[in-house]
Image (spheres, rainbow, N blue to C red):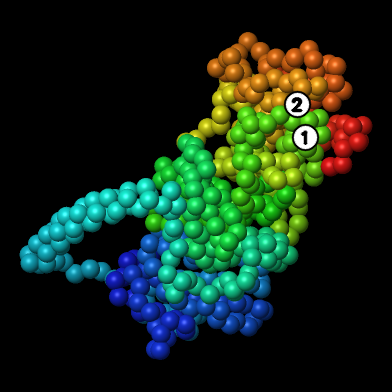
Amino acid sequence: DRSMRVHKTLTLQCYCERCSANSSCTTDGVCFVAIRKSGSRQTTERSMCVHENELIPRDRPFICAPSVKHETGIYPMCCNTDYCNKNPDPSVFPVPTEKTPPLGPVALAAVIAGPVCVLCLLLVLAFYVCHSAGAHHHHHHHRVPNEEDPSMDHPFITVGTTLKDLIYDMTTSGSGSGLPLLVQRTIARTIILQESIGKGRFGEVWRGKWRGEEVAVKIFSSREERSWFREAEIYQTVMLRHENILGFIAITGRGTQLWLVSDYHEHGSLFDYLNRYTVTVEGMIKTVPVHCQRPGPLHMEIVGTQGKPAIAHRDLKSKNILVKKNGTCCIADLGLAVRHDSATDTIDIAPNHRVGTKRYMAPEVLDDSINMKHFESFKRADIYAMGLVFWEIASRCSMGGIHEDYQLPYYDLVVCEQKLRPNIPNRWQSCEALRVMAKIMRECWYANGAARLTALRIKKTLSQLSQQEGIKM
């Protein structure tokens, strides 16, 4: 990996084969070129300007980082001298450093006075923009269009291409790193935000549209940059395209906003769904977070060309699980996830000021006795939280019209104290499916993490229950 610090240049000239008659453009950022390498051959795929506000993060811009790890692929490169991207030499890519001559008295006065004048103008402009935006927001029913001038869009996605087409290409390409960053940026630039559908400590979630298709846009607040970067890192370096994990589409930084674009699920979170609806026995079994029902996207390690490590979520709860149209669920919010590489037996925990949700924390997490160097500890804590989610679902299972009102686990307690656990109603014993679910919950809630069920054991039990109830999964 190559780290690159970009020095701002106001009049950088770059080669751009699709820009103007003289095939050049001007930028305050860097010149960009994408090279396709095949053995000893290399061809230029794209040359263009990248503006300074598109360089996210500044010290190591995503767009300048390699997106593949194979001998054959597209390699992006950035540089900051005039026309340095016209005939690139991948082995030698100079980044000149120029010493700034000392300023004279007149120049120094201009440097001081200039920003003051600009600041005054910006304050006036900001007041005008805020006033106009308020009026626009009121008259357009919370519709927030942000589509940019199509002439500024990069022609990486052909007309008629759908998200399904792009995802299929991504999953069959074998690169294992998601959509190319330039394609992700192109998608994000042309999304039209429709309405806000949720808020949290991380920021806000919007329903948006891209070429008529609905997507979810998670907009992180600036103080949650580490969570945004962590999710981006996991999605970009680990091929997490699995039916039981929220489908990732794109990640990008737009000015001060940090975006994560994903599949849109109209039912919303499991928390919202259970507040609105009850479930049947079949619905309960289908709604149970399916990383315990099918080949699990979490905890299970897949070793191969895509190098998928095992992952523990660390913040499993009903608000981080989404309900799909077919009644099954997918897991979202990987901002706290921890990765384990069995080849080196190392655990990757990103530095983050966020902690999980206390209501769902296992006893060993609450009393700080968890072994942070042992990956099994994180898996066991996930299982404890999953048992609480099972309780939420089972509580809304209607038998003969009888069901409990929706409640969060420990609704009458602040946190787990004195080894108390959520109450299991007596009526559950009269229904085989609820009786089995209750048994699973109790074995997920053991104070001793090593005694808890594994995800595989839960999967087998649920599979047997599905067969007994005649439910096709």
Residue 285 visible (yes or no): no
Single out the residue that lies furthest toward the left.
105
Of 334 and 309, the residue lying toward us: 334
Q: Callout 2: helix, strand or loop?
A: loop
Q: Nearer the viewer, residue 244 or 13?
A: 244
**Callout 1: few (<14), some (14-19), or many (20+) C-alpha neighbours within 10 Å?**
some
Name the image quarter holding the C terminus. Answer: top right
In the drawing, does residue 297 fall left or right of residue 199?
right
Structural distance between the alpha carbons of marks 2 and 1: 8 Å
Residue 374, horizontal then vertical, whole percent: 67, 34
220 w.r.t. 89: above or below: above
Say above or below: 251 vs 277.
Answer: below
Q: Earlier in the sequence, mark 2 or mark 1?
A: 1
Q: Residue at x 62, y 23 (%)?
A: 408
| Residue hosting label 1 | 283
Task: Look at mark 2 in the image and give the residue it sits on.
Answer: 397
In which quadrant is the N terminus drawn? bottom right
